[in-house]
């Protein structure tokens, strides 16, 4: 009889426990069942008149119910308090946190770092120099006298005092050689300027110049080092080819192409259906250039190269419009994280 009553009570207790939503309901519940005159307490009091065996059995049952209930009420209370706190703060504490947005290096800076790292490994020192140059370093010392048509191809911004915005990083060859004694190996990354603007040209862009001077440097070193660099940047399977070319400050001169990384030689939009993409100019340092820095051409030989950083980045990332690098749209920049 009493057992049935207790079972009924249990059912009632758990049912109404589920309905508790506020602290006041919780308090009422506690008084109703666990208070001094509460139902569980009253049953426990009743037990003293029961035979020993039953007293033990029912006592155990009721005490277990009581301690279980006390535990559940505690966690319920915590839950309600949390919810009310959330309401006070006007936030949902279950929402994921906000991550601080950490910046990233510009894709052009990333490529520059990578190039410097590759050439450092080959013993090249990284140097930088002025973007405002003199005509002498930018042209004359590089065997481009003022009547030379190569000057027209690199129209730039001249200042009234004769200084100009450098059109390439090649003047760093002259500066580096004057500041050092051979043998030497340098790479010089930096900004250059030309009067040029379309999807593939920007009036400001970046180049990296390389120069190696030693007693026994040959065209083989040029090919070996530049092929190694291409494979490091574009992958082990990258094919390269060298085409004869002309630059006033090298003789012989070449241009290096890589097999198009998009179509692998078949021809596509990126390579203009050619299957190959030109990535740099290079050659053996011209004796006139050595003369300008007073290096004895009977002892010293060298090779030089210059390449456009944006070019590398465009091929590497499949970017078709050079201007995207300088418009600074966050969506674009964030894709290089
Ligand atoms: N300065 C050249 C340009 O901007 C690139 C270049 C070609 C650099 C051959 C070199 C070189 O050092 O050897 O078009």
Image (cartoon, helix red, strand yellow):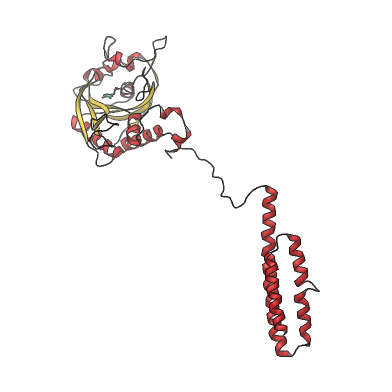
Residue 326: image location, x then y, percent: 43, 27
Image: 216 above or below 137: below
- In this orientation, which residue lies closer to the viewer: 55 or 32? 32
Residue 54: image location, x then y, percent: 71, 88
The quadrant in which the N terminus is found is: bottom right
- In this orientation, which residue lies closer to the viewer: 321 or 9? 9
Image: 72 above or below 268: below
Q: Residue at x 39, y 10 (%)?
A: 162
- Quarter of the render that holds ligand 1: top left
Task: Name the outermost residue toward the right.
Answer: 37
Image: 36 above or below 239: below
Residue 3: image location, x then y, percent: 70, 83
Question: Taking the image as drawn, is residue 182 in sight?
Answer: no
Image: 2 above or below 322: below
Instruction: Please give left or right for residue 239 compared with residue 34 in the image.
Output: left
Quadrant of residue 218 within the rendered picture: top left
Question: Taking the image as drawn, is residue 317 in sight?
Answer: yes
The quadrant in which the C terminus is found is: top left
Quadrant of residue 274 within the rendered picture: top left
Instruction: Please give left or right for residue 131 compared with residue 277 in the image.
Output: right
Quadrant of residue 7 within the rendered picture: bottom right
- In this orientation, which residue lies closer to the viewer: 185 or 243? 243
Q: Residue at x 71, y 76 (%)?
A: 9
């Amino acid at each position: 009889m009493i057992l049935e009553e207790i079972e009924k009570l249990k059912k009632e207790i758990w049912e109404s426990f589920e309905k508790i939503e506020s602290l006041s309901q919780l308090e009422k519940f506690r008084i109703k069942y666990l208070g001094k005159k509460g139902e569980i307490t009253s049953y426990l009091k009743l037990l003293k008149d029961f035979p020993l065996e039953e007293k033990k059995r029912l006592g155990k049952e009721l005490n277990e119910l009581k301690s279980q209930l006390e535990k559940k009420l505690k966690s319920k209370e915590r839950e309600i308090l949390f919810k009310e706190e959330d309401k006070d703060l006007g936030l949902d504490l279950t929402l994921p946190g906000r991550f601080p947005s950490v910046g990233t290096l510009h894709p052009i800076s990333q490529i520059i770092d990578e190039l410097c790292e590759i050439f450092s490994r080959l013993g090249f020192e990284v140097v930088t120099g002025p973007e405002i140059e003199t005509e002498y370093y930018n042209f004359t010392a590089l065997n481009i006298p003022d009547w030379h048509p190569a000057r027209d191809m690199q129209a730039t911004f001249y200042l009234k005092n004769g200084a100009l915005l450098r059109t390439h990083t090649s003047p760093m060859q002259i500066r580096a050689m004057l500041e050092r004694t051979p043998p030497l190996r340098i790479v010089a990354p930096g900004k250059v300027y030309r009067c040029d603007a379309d999807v593939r040209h920007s009036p400001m862009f970046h180049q990296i110049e390389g120069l190696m001077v030693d007693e026994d440097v040959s065209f083989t070193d040029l090919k070996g080092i530049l092929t190694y660099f291409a494979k490091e940047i574009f992958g082990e399977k990258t094919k390269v080819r060298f085409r004869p070319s002309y630059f006033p400050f090298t003789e012989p001169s070449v241009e290096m192409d890589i097999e198009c990384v998009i179509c692998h030689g078949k021809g596509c939009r990126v390579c203009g259906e050619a299957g190959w993409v030109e990535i740099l100019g290079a050659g053996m340092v011209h004796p006139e250039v050595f003369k300008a820095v007073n290096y004895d051409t009977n002892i010293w030989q060298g090779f030089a190269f210059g390449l456009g950083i944006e070019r590398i980045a465009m091929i590497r990332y499949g970017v078709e419009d050079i201007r995207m690098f300088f418009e600074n749209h966050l969506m674009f920049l964030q894709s290089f994280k």
